[in-house]
Amino acid sequence: MSGRMHDLHAIQIDPIITRALEEDWGFGDWTTDICVPAGKQSLATIIAKEPALVAGVDVAAAVFRKVDPTLSIKLVAKNGDRVDKGAVLLEISGCARSILKAERVALNLFARMCGIATMTRAFVDQLEGTKGQLLDTRKTTPGLRILEKSATVIGGARNHRFSLCDGVIVKENHIRASGGIKAAVSRLLESLPPTLKVEVEVTSLDEVQEALDAGAHVLMLDNMTVSEMTMAVRTVRGRALVEASGNVRLENVRRVAETGVDFISTSAIFHSSRWADLSLLFSLDPVVQ
């Protein structure tokens, strides 16, 4: 499994921010450049318009700093905070034009990350009292994986592999193309660095036994029923780690965890989460000069 990616470095997020700003600006911001005086100084705040789990406040701040390093930025909330409707998350003061030009990209990334973290925490809360740990997946928005996976960690999940070179998962099509579970696992164990675990996707109790006999370190129970997962855990008896995957939803994740699996992976924390409702508001008090 991949390491945790919570604290992001500027080297990691700067290319994402640059591409997003290039996309948003196009040939220029007619509205801001014509309507707003060049010397206008302002104070703005980003607020939560609904309860949320904060994730990406540092990313939003980095957007404003990228647009204008002279802006003064105060992180009022921190990643991992649960906030109520109306909470102030970030304060920005300085050139009004710069704030306006950074606004949309900052809100887009911030709201996406808060939404994922909020959904992730809802799943994690359902697992309380069980041994099951929530894992994310690679079903992320292209180009935003590092931000989205960071948000799942803030929400309380653990990262699954980040990329294909990060770990080994023998899935259904690999099994078909290589001639079976035994053949695939044997080749991997002969060639892989010894520090890498081999995970095999299985869809039946027969395949559970076959993967165990082949020497798999982790079994991914794919789209099994709760009763099948319970039997699979009993069959494994601790000889490998067990991950449940497929059709995992907020409504059934507790039942899945109660089967005794070690991990539960779901892409729902990405595709079923909605953006948090955040807003940037300019102060009407003209004191910032």
Image (tube, grey):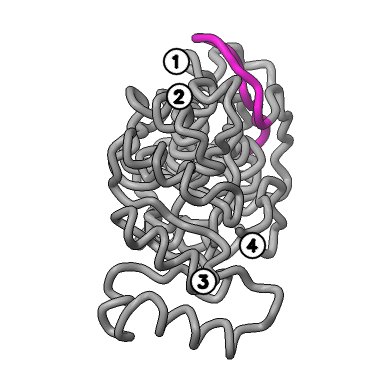
The amino acid type of the residue labelled 1 equals Lys
Could you tell me which residue is drawn at 44 percent across and 14 percent down? 50
The amino acid type of the residue labelled 2 equals Ser
Let me know if residue 38 appears in the view.
no
Q: Is residue 6 magenta?
A: no
Q: Which residue is mark 4?
A: 12
Task: Residue 229 in the image: state x and y as whole percent.
Answer: 38, 41
- Labels 4 and 1: the sequence-earlier one: 4
The amino acid type of the residue labelled 3 equals Val
Question: Disc 1 vs disc 2: Cβ atoms closer than 8 Å?
Answer: yes
Judge the density around disc 3: few (<14), some (14-19), many (≥20) Cα neighbours within 10 Å.
some
Q: Which residue is mark 2?
A: 279
Q: Which residue is mark 3?
A: 168
In depth, the one of 11 and 227 nearer the eye is 227
Task: Residue 109 in the image: state x and y as whole percent.
Answer: 48, 43
In depth, the one of 88 and 54 nearer the eye is 54
Residue 31: image tag: none
Q: Which residue is mark 1?
A: 49
Q: How far apart are the two marked residues, 4 and 1, measured between alpha carbons?
A: 29 Å
Magenta stretch: give its range. Answer: 79-95
- Labels 2 and 3: the sequence-earlier one: 3
Q: Nearer the viewer, mark 1 or mark 2?
A: 1
Task: Residue 45 in the image: state x and y as whole percent.
Answer: 58, 23
The amino acid type of the residue labelled 4 equals Gln
Indicate whether 275 appears above or below 179. Answer: above
Indicate whether 250 appears above or below 234. Answer: above
Residue 167 found in image quarter: bottom right
Indicate whether 143 appears above or below 168. Answer: above
